[in-house]
Image (cartoon, grey):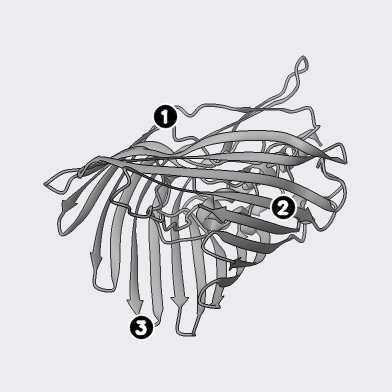
Amino acid sequence: MKKSLVALILLGLSQFANAGEDFFSSVQINVDTLPSDDNSPVEFRGYVLAIGKYGLDAPLAEYAFERSEAGISQMRTDAFMELRGSASDSLQWQVSGKAELDWYRWESGQGEWGLDRSRLRLKDAFIDATFDNGLWIRAGHQIFTWGESEGLAVTDVLSPIDSRAPGQAELQDIREQIPAVLASIPAADGKLSLVVSYRAGHNRYAESEDDFYPYITLKDSGINIHVQDPQDWYEYAVRWERQFNGGDISFAAADVNANELSVVDFQQSNNAAPSLSFSQARIQMAGATANRVFGSWLLKGELAYHWGQMVDTGIAPLALEQDQWRSALVGEYSGFDDLLISLELNNIYALQQYEAEGLGKSKLSQTGLVFRVRQTALNERLTNQLWFYSLELERGVSAGSIVRADTSYDLSDSWELGLAAVIYTSTDNSQLLYPYQNNDSINATVKYLF
């Protein structure tokens, strides 16, 4: 009985640890440049964002969620500031930071107002240097988005993501900066880039009082959770890319720590509480991306081979390493006025199969789906979007699905309003999203830009 319970716990944990990667870890980001003002030595921009979330139902009572009824689930204020300047024509710098203030918390079924948590995080903090031979060097905190997929990490393996609330954050906001040195130089009619990073960290996960605490199956179980440092803090990646009329291609390789945490050890003794340890696996990747415009269609493809991915076997206590082919095919159609339709199919093809106790043989192939519709109106001041995510995990077990519908309206150049509904679906307790199936929410935001 104990072995079966531990196996079930590890299955859920390992699948959730991979969730950030599976659902959201290859998001493309367009980083806006700061406004140009030749008379100002330092340029700046920023925003203040108020976020309110209302849980539409009580979370499942069989898990130790702090919130026990429908109601406000979060009230938060984010403040962001970015500064940019130049020391010369060939040397520029940029630094930004973000403060997060939580004003509402749940504890043992009771909601309370007041400043609960405050966090100040460094975002961009880098120096750019350009040289006459075309060499460009960027050193410091920066974001990397290598890839075409919005639902699966294929070649995009560098930057971690913020997975504290799956499906609820804007996709362009979940990518995390890492400390790194990027060197780029023209080569073979394209551009060759080399990245070296140190202490890049892992995905951000929700805390124990939050609605999406990743270890909810262990909460109040008496099992101690530990996060171990990876064996090597250094990470390396290289990419060659070339643009041509109507599209571009790239080839990339990397030796990095996986951004998701995986189970690495479980210990149990008569004299101490059980202990479960997580860490980042070391993985290697080699792959390619391509995209091309055909009239109103934009087609994007991505293919990579991964060595050393950690997957759960369903047998306590450890996961195992698995080599995988990962791929994604995306089609975007913009032939309708003010409407963009996108469909992505992504796939993991595992070369090694294994037997899982009580669950049979693992599947060779697993396929995920991302569907997106985006509509703009009123001279692009109003934006409506519909997202649908569905993924098949190890052994063909569905993770469940997430549906998000959101709308945003620009009142002016400075004020933006947003409203979103996020729905989680799960049919049985073998699915990743099962503990969170009642955590549907309505999210409202007010943003002031300066």
Q: Is residue 139 visible?
A: yes
Residue at (77%, 61%) from the top-left corner?
427
Disc 1 vs disc 3: Cβ atoms closer than 8 Å?
A: no
Task: Tell me residue 45's x, y (percent).
Answer: 45, 49
Tag 1: Cα neighbours inside 10 Å, few (<14), some, or many (≥20)? few
Q: Nearer the viewer, mark 1 or mark 2?
A: 2
Residue 328, compared with residue 108, is above or below; it is: below
Question: Mark 1 = which residue?
Answer: 233
Identify which amino acid the numbered label 2 is placed on. Answer: Gly
Structural distance between the alpha carbons of marks 1 and 2: 37 Å
Q: Is residue 105 left or right of residue 33?
A: right
Residue at (56%, 63%) from the top-left corner?
368
Indicate which disc, 2 or 3, sits on the residue closer to the N terminus.
2
Secondary structure under tag 3 reads loop
Residue at (73%, 19%) from the top-left corner?
269
In the picture as drawn, the residue positioned furthest to the bottom comes out as 336
Q: Is residue 192 left or right of residue 373?
A: left
Structural distance between the alpha carbons of marks 2 and 3: 41 Å
Task: Tell me residue 193's x, y (percent).
Answer: 26, 47
Secondary structure under tag 1 reads loop
Indicate which disc, 1 or 2, sits on the residue closer to the N terminus.
2
Q: Nearer the viewer, mark 2 or mark 3?
A: 2
Structural distance between the alpha carbons of marks 1 and 3: 45 Å
Question: Mark 2 = which residue?
Answer: 52
Identify which amino acid the numbered label 3 is placed on. Answer: Gly
Tag 3: Cα neighbours inside 10 Å, few (<14), some, or many (≥20)? few
Question: Mark 3 = which residue?
Answer: 295
Identify which amino acid the numbered label 1 is placed on. Answer: Trp
